[in-house]
Image (cartoon, grey):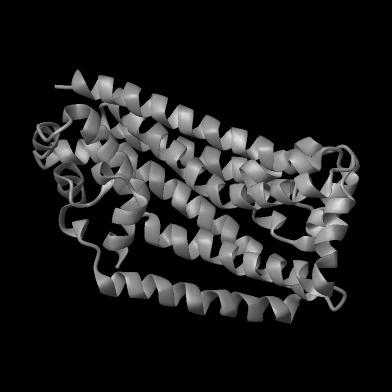
Amino acid sequence: MFNRLMRWFLPVSATADQPAIRLILGRSAQTNRRQWIIHILMAVVYIPAILIGGQLVMTPAASRTAGMMNSLLGMVIFGQFFTSAGALALTLSVINDQRKHNTWDIVRTTAGGTRQAVRAAWTAAVFYRLSGWLGVLVYAPRFFMLGVLLIDLMGFRGEYLDQIVGGATPSVPWIAGIPLFALMLTTLFLLPLSTLGLEAAIGLFLSTTIRSRFGLSLIQAVLTLARLLWGIVGLMLLNLGENVIIRVDSGQTWQVAVSTLAGDWGFSLLHAAHLEVLWRDIPYMAYFGVGLMGIIFLHLLLTEGLLTWAARRAQRME
């Protein structure tokens, strides 16, 4: 099932049937159906468990949606850090591991040469080895809260959505506000993948720059710590409230931007009451999705550049 989904979602050159990717994945090239089922069951079980636990500690004044968001937020932050650390660990060591097992030269001789080998290593890390955990820890809570958000927005015959869009500062025409709102929601699902892809590309580039295992281990520890501190900075800007996830002062657009990029990758924006406050109190917040889409395209450009650079350096490796 998973491999069929990947064939539909990814270009032909990035499927597990390709020789370079199959060599890098090794025995895990064909995803075990049992493992796929386990990941689905984990998502189905752990989200209700966290919500039930959150209900036990939630303040009585908190709304139902805010309680769900506050309960899931910590797990989402942990999931993001876990997948980020995993992306760095997998890509920093992939070339050395392949060389240790005398398979790197074989990978390089497949169609596409070193360029395809580097991209295969990136694809194997992002779309195969980390995909299950990314789905369980990062995307499952997002889809759950998206469903809650849509239910809230459709309340009162859709008047709540009109209230959010109509309350934007400065005012936005309804015909433009709805697409802007939809664009922002879309970017909240693209941002985790683009961020993870960039982190994996950084790991691959460094793996072609630093040859010694000690150096790679040291840089992995430094980058993991830096990622943790970067996430803490974002979390510090998430001032958890009872009915609104982030309490912001008027004009603090940078606070929302940093907390989105560093803290929760936009997860807390999947909250109707929160969005209503942000669109009303922060000027031009309606265009935040446009800015996030620009960041995502920047991630893609940086990822492409790092992978190309890494392939050139890998070509010169002995």
Q: Position of residue 249 (x, y in %)?
A: 90, 44
Instruction: Indicate whether 293 appears above or below 279.
Output: above
Q: Quadrant of residue 92?
A: top left
Q: Split into 4 quadrants, where in the image is the N terminus?
A: bottom left
Q: Please state if 130 lies on the left or on the right of 75 as rendered.
A: left
**Residue 240 makes an appearance in the image:** no
Q: Quadrant of residue 254?
A: top right
Q: Where is residue 5 in the image (x, y as percent from the top left)?
A: 33, 60
- Nearest the eye: 190 or 4: 4
Q: Please state if 151 lies on the left or on the right of 97 as rendered.
A: right
Residue at position x 25%, y 40% in the image: 120
Q: Quadrant of residue 110?
A: top left
Q: Where is residue 35 in the image (x, y as percent from the top left)?
A: 30, 70
Q: Please state if 105 lies on the left or on the right of 267 as rendered.
A: left
Residue at position x 90%, y 46% in the image: 281
Instruction: Indicate whether 186 appears above or below 32.
Output: above
- Nearest the eye: 204 or 197: 197
Residue at position x 65%, y 47% in the image: 183
Q: Where is residue 314 in the image (x, y as percent from the top left)?
A: 23, 24
**Residue 271 makes an appearance in the image:** yes
Q: Split into 4 quadrants, where in the image is the C terminus?
A: top left
Q: Please state if 192 lies on the left or on the right of 92 as rendered.
A: right
The image shows a total of numbered marks equal to 0
Query: Which residue extends farthest front?
Result: 175
